[in-house]
Amino acid sequence: MRGNRTAASRPSRVRVRGAAIAAFVVLAAMVPAAASAAGPQKVEAELPYVCALPSGERASTVRISAEFPDRAERGEAISPAGVTTTVELPAEAVADLTALEAATVRAATRLTVGVAQGEAAAEAIWHGTAQPAALPASGPLTLTATGDVPTVTGQGHGELRFSAGNLTVDLTPGAADGTAVGPRSLTVSCSPAGRTPEGGLLATVPVGADAAEPSGSPSPPDASPGTPEPSSGTPRDRQGDRAPEVAENPAGSAAGRDAPPCAYTEENPFGPLSMNAYITGYSNVKKQKGASLLPVSCVLLETKEMLAEPDENGNFVVTIKAEGELHHEGRKQSPPFRSTFLSFGFVPTTATMVLEQTGPMTIEFASTYVGLDIVAETFVRVPLRLRVTDLEVNGVPLDVGSGCRTEKPLRSTDPDPANHPGDHLVMYGKGEQKYAEDATGYMLLTGGPLTGEATIPAFTGCGGGREDLDRLLTASVSGPGNHIKQIQGQTCTPSAPVFETPESRGQCTEDLQPYQIPVAER
């Protein structure tokens, strides 16, 4: 289904300090990574870095591999493919994690990549996630993260130059079975060390019909008098070069893409001062040894409580508590989605499913103000039951009946079980915002990644009264250790067109739906 996507102005990159939204992810079909252009350049770079660990600054190694197109036309969006960021942290990092009683660690990376054309420049953020890794008994810790990256568009003639910059690594400690040992992650900031003469250059991509072949050194832009003037608001250097355009996410933010309706209506329980947002993401299905995609879904949310108080270090902490719900055709559920796996390694099984919300979704967002900077942590808790509506095994339709579902909601290990009892999914996000800079990681209004891990319960009621399919589905899907990564888009506040501020401008389409439709990241 496609919502009415009449767009307002393109959203600005919002800098915000409050309000709330989030959600979830579980099963669906795999999708391939974006294909690279013909004749790609294969890049394998090994760079020296210095990483700030709790035990001090330590020399580390970062290896970056990717494929870039061999050339591009002016105005053509290009995207590096097959991007991996491998971080080799010294033995001191292992000791720091062991001190947190960790046996495993999961990593998420954010690599700042400088993009320049002539003297004009911009920055892109390459996000990556790594599978859980066991801490070595001795020696360095090596983590390899993968993920899709934003597109870059050259605005003039001449080479686009991609250079590696600062790197942030979020480390989530875990027990031997991969479950989290605590709610907090360890953030490690890394900077390039001992710059090479090329300045961390990864690749160059010639832009324009007369561009030179790719090389390891920059070349000046084409100063053709026929180059058009940039549109209003486009950064320019002192010679008039237009900065390369970097998309906000791998597929950009554009109205008109397929998405279910997601707007306030009279039958919704939340008022016109509530917010809405789109979410999507991936989940590992451990038994199937694969990743699954949840289609773009709508979440509505309303703030219930706001607290402000100092912490033990004298920093100001603002905590926002909110409640939310999934919204699809007036029901608290996701849109239907299909997933195909090779059950037991050889039997193709395709199911059509929905995720049903069976209780309150709660969001707790705590932002700590350290001087003029902000560090934020978010917990989302929601009980979700997985319902199967159709099933095919090896191409043969099987009648699952109308009551085929997990016998209980999906279950995570909650870091605060005394105050949050019962079976529910827990998602966690962390974000930072430096003064006068864009936020990184997860912030409630701008969105971003949330992660979690869930146990999928056994199935019940499957078979339509003719045959018992409970054990087939349970054996194929149910079990612990299913890692989840959700991406939330920027929120829409329906009141923004009335009470518009620089922070809210461009969040919504004219019919009060979220402007930004996120793209799932592995």
Image (cartoon, rainbow, N blue to C red):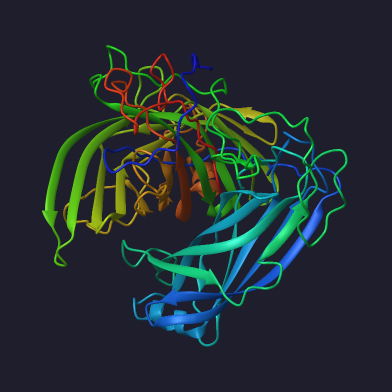
Q: Is residue 429 above or below residue 180?
A: above
Left or right of 234, for residue 482: left
Q: Is residue 178 above or below residue 486?
A: below
Expressed as whole percent of the image width and height from the top left, the position of residue 226 reads 78, 30
Residue toward you, 455 or 142: 142
Expressed as whole percent of the image width and height from the top left, the position of residue 22 reads 35, 39
Residue toward you, 334 or 115: 115
- In the rendered image, the residue lying farthest to the bottom is 138
Left or right of 358, for residue 26: right
At 66% from the left edge and 67% from the top edge, which residue is drawn? 199
- Residue 441 visible at all: no
- Residue 26 visible at all: yes
At 31% from the left edge and 30% from the top edge, which residue is drawn? 325
Q: Is residue 507 above or below residue 3?
A: below
Residue toward you, 34 or 422: 34
Q: Quadrant of residue 186?
A: bottom left
Q: Quadrant of residue 231?
A: top right
Marker count (numbered): 0
Expressed as whole percent of the image width and height from the top left, the position of residue 98 reads 39, 80
At 53% from the left edge and 45% from the top edge, which residue is drawn? 282
Expressed as whole percent of the image width and height from the top left, the position of residue 204 reads 76, 54
